[in-house]
Image (cartoon, rainbow, N blue to C red):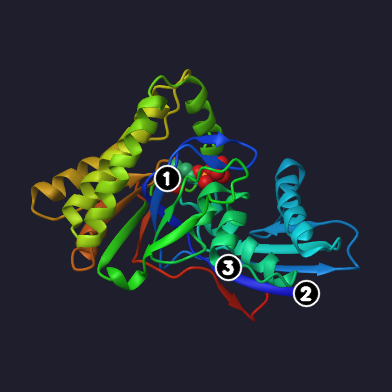
Amino acid sequence: MKATAHAHPNIALIKYWGKRDQKLFLPHTPSLSMTLSSLTAVTTAEFSASLAADTVMLDGRPVEGAALERFSAHLDRIRALAGISLRARVVSANDFPTAAGLASSAAGGAALTAALCRAAGLDLSPHEMSALARRFSGSACRSVEGGFCQWNRGERTDGSDSFAVQVFPAGHWPELRMVVTVVSAAQKEVSSRAGMQHSVETSPFFEAWVRQVDADLAEALSALERRDLRALGSIAETNACRMHAVALGAHPPVLYMKPVTLDVISRVHALRAQGIEAWFTLDAGPNPVVLCLAADAPRVAAALEEIPGVQKTVTAGPGEGVTQSEKHLF
Ligand code: DP6
């Protein structure tokens, strides 16, 4: 009853921002993402009769308090599905900073769900696993499969139709790159979870966001199908700015950007003026992610790394979904 799974973060091209059901993690809108080929979360989980309580280690530190309760609630869902009551030991490690806008909860949530299901002897379809991963962290449902995934909003109140489906495999556009630009590895002050809920409750722009997303998504899907970087980059950049406008319209406002975030954005615009197709997106944190083609990625990364305050860049292409491994962390 022990299993290990690997998963990668996904970066949304069309963002998820706002829940219609906070308990079931049901979004107001659909979203679209690319699963990355690098940056990996590894989780080993074991159910055992010798354990008196659930224990979780994340990046070498024990998880306690409310954070541990969140893990235990997820463990309870899996125990209920598998019809077991055993406690579990979970050890998880990321090779990138946690909770700094690098979608760590997505990779971690997908790896955790996959490892727990296997350890519990559950044989779920990717869509069932995606719906389950969604309960740990919404965006985690898009890291179960690789390539380009669309998280359907779903209509049912029980959430059974709200999961991510792969719309194109990683091989659809192997030349596409995302240059993840790390300007801060610190934990952000306002989590995505808190920021989006505060936006739903207080931003007068939230309704406009909900009305807009279907059109943004259709534009992005069409660009993705045609492998048209200019069209995809343009709508991804616009959609990210729309999400941040919603957060900035909240009361009090939620500002995720730092001065260096704007320096990176200005440099992306300057690169475009020089004829390099580079477009940014930005999650709920200060670290921009820049879309470009593989042939331009070294130049884009070098230009971004020159900016004072940029700590490093990590370039990734479209990657695979969760995989199981026999190399356990304990
Ligand atoms: C800005 O999935 O981290 O990255 O569902 O509350 O766990 P919870 O939130 P989370 O939010 C991600 C928000 C985002 C946009 C996106 O990934 O689509």
Indicate the position of residue 290 as horizontal and vertical percent values.
29, 52
The mark lying in front, picked from 2 and 3, is: 3
Q: Mark 1 CB in 8 Å range of ligand 1?
A: no
- Image-quadrant location for residue 247: top left
The residue at the far left in this view is 274
Indicate the position of residue 231 as horizontal and vertical percent values.
18, 50
Using the numbered discs, state the Cα–Cα distance from disc 1 to disc 3 in whole angstroms: 21 Å
User: Label 3 belongs to which residue?
Assistant: 125
Q: Residue at x 33, y 41 (%)?
A: 214
Badge 3, how many Cα within 10 Å: few under 14, some, many 20+?
Answer: few
Element type at mark 2: loop
User: Label 1 belongs to which residue?
Assistant: 30
Asked whether, in this view, residue 228 is left or right of residue 140, the answer is left
On-image quarter of the C terminus:
bottom right
Using the numbered discs, state the Cα–Cα distance from disc 1 to disc 2 in whole angstroms: 35 Å
The amino acid at mark 2 is: Met
The answer to whether marks 1 and 2 mark residues whose Cβ atoms lie closer than 8 Å is no
Q: Is residue 97 visible?
A: no
67 above or below 247? below
91 above or below 216? below
Using the numbered discs, state the Cα–Cα distance from disc 2 to disc 3 in whole angstroms: 19 Å
Badge 2, how many Cα within 10 Å: few under 14, some, many 20+?
Answer: some
Give the mark nearest the N terminus, 1 or 2: 2
Q: Which of the two residues, 313 or 236, is positioned nearer the viewer here?
A: 236
Q: Residue at x 8, y 51 (%)?
A: 274
Q: Residue at x 63, y 44 (%)?
A: 158
User: Label 2 belongs to which residue?
Assistant: 1
1 above or below 90? below
Indicate the position of residue 312 as horizontal and vertical percent values.
37, 56
